[in-house]
Amino acid sequence: MTDRGGPFVVADIGGTTLRIGHVTAGDPVVRGVRRVATEGLARYPDAPVAELQQRVLGQLATELAAYLVRSEAAGSRAVGLSFAGPTTVDGVALAAPTIWGEGGGSVALNAHLGARLGLPVLTVNDITAAAWRYARAEDDAFCLFTVSSGVGSKVFRRGEVLVDDAGFGGELGHWRVDWSGTAPPCDCGGRGHLGGIASGRGILRAVRVAARQRPGEFAGSALAASSAGRPEGITNEAVAGAVRRGDSFAVDVLRAALRPLALAVASVFSSIGIRRYIFIGGFAVAVGQPFVDILGDELTELGCFGLTPPQVRAMLMLGAADDDHSLIGVGRMLAAAGADPRLAAEAAHAYVDRW
């Protein structure tokens, strides 16, 4: 990959936060990052989808326009937007459960923002963007998982992320793995999806349920002390800390939650032979190496045909301990395409028949 040009203004919008910064080709650091709360579902839980879509569009246009007049962003040739939902090659957002909830029509982000800003705009899925941060060479092959409020995934191979032009692919977070009547809900409106079980939200829910169902074990856990003995007082930060310290109650619940994630990794390996899996996201990074170790236990138990247990464990690794993955990645995509968002989008949306 040859990076060219810049500076580029880059943004990442999720259910909680909109972040905007700028990058220059060859510089791995995002500079001048501004953070504001997303004007979406988290702030206005009772607002209809159509209203939330307009709020988010207006916020993106206003915040990006204000950032573009800052001196350090002067001369920007293009804008890259990382979006928490599936997008088409033309930058149309098809859905955004964590931003504006279930339902709603598609939103032409590239067209709308480009007209408002007077610059070409590249919009890609956030995990697609993040994958570009970790591509070491055009012949590199890996699968990137994010484990935070949800679970996302993308496969990168030969300079492309495996997503078709309509935005399909890399949505293992919405793969149904629990068909029971008590399967936990997912933000998309479904139940029993991987993202509702192995995400930070899903694991926190599972820990609180276990604390109510197994009060004796909970009472002996560090989580009881940190929550004053109240299951509803348990936080993700407390769970991550308890796992790092080897708390048996927290580790046991996490292990059960990661079994479906291990199954997802095994399915990717078995179907297309990917042998590098990178895990990012607030929850995975907060737990740290124990997250990879416990997942490795479960994946070894499942088995990956033809690999020894050490080879299985060697496939798993943590990404960088920051939240700049998508910002850096979308900047790299623009730089590699010479600031041409169309070329960058085509690289982000590989057809299956190119393999």
Image (cartoon, rainbow, N blue to C red):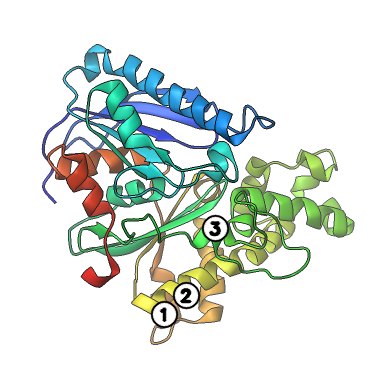
Q: Which residue is mark 3?
A: 290
- Helix, strand or loop under label 3: helix
Q: Nearer the viewer, residue 296 or 60?
A: 60
Asked if residue 19 lies left or right of residue 187, the reply is: left
Q: Residues within 10 Å of mark 1 (few under 14, many from 20)?
A: few
Q: Are marks 2 and 1 in contact (CB under 8 Å)?
A: yes
Name which quarter of the figure residue 197 lies in. bottom right
Asked if residue 60 lies left or right of residue 204, the reply is: left
x and y percent of residue 335 in the render? 17, 40
- Helix, strand or loop under label 2: helix
x and y percent of residue 205 in the render? 72, 51
Q: Residue at x 69, y 49 (%)?
A: 204
Q: Nearer the viewer, residue 45 or 272?
A: 45
Q: Which residue is mark 1?
A: 270
Q: Residue at x 60, y 69 (%)?
A: 259
The residue type indicated by label 3 comes to: Pro
Residue 325 appears in the figure: no
Q: Nearer the viewer, residue 338 or 343?
A: 343
Frontmost of labels 3 and 1 is 1
- Helix, strand or loop under label 1: helix
The residue type indicated by label 2 comes to: Ala
Residue at mark 3 to residue at mark 1: CA–CA distance: 24 Å
Residue at mark 2 to residue at mark 1: CA–CA distance: 6 Å
12 in relation to 174, above or below: above
Q: Tell me the number on the disc at residue 266.
A: 2
Asked if residue 183 lies left or right of residue 60, the reply is: right
241 in relation to 294, above or below: above
3 in relation to 53, above or below: below
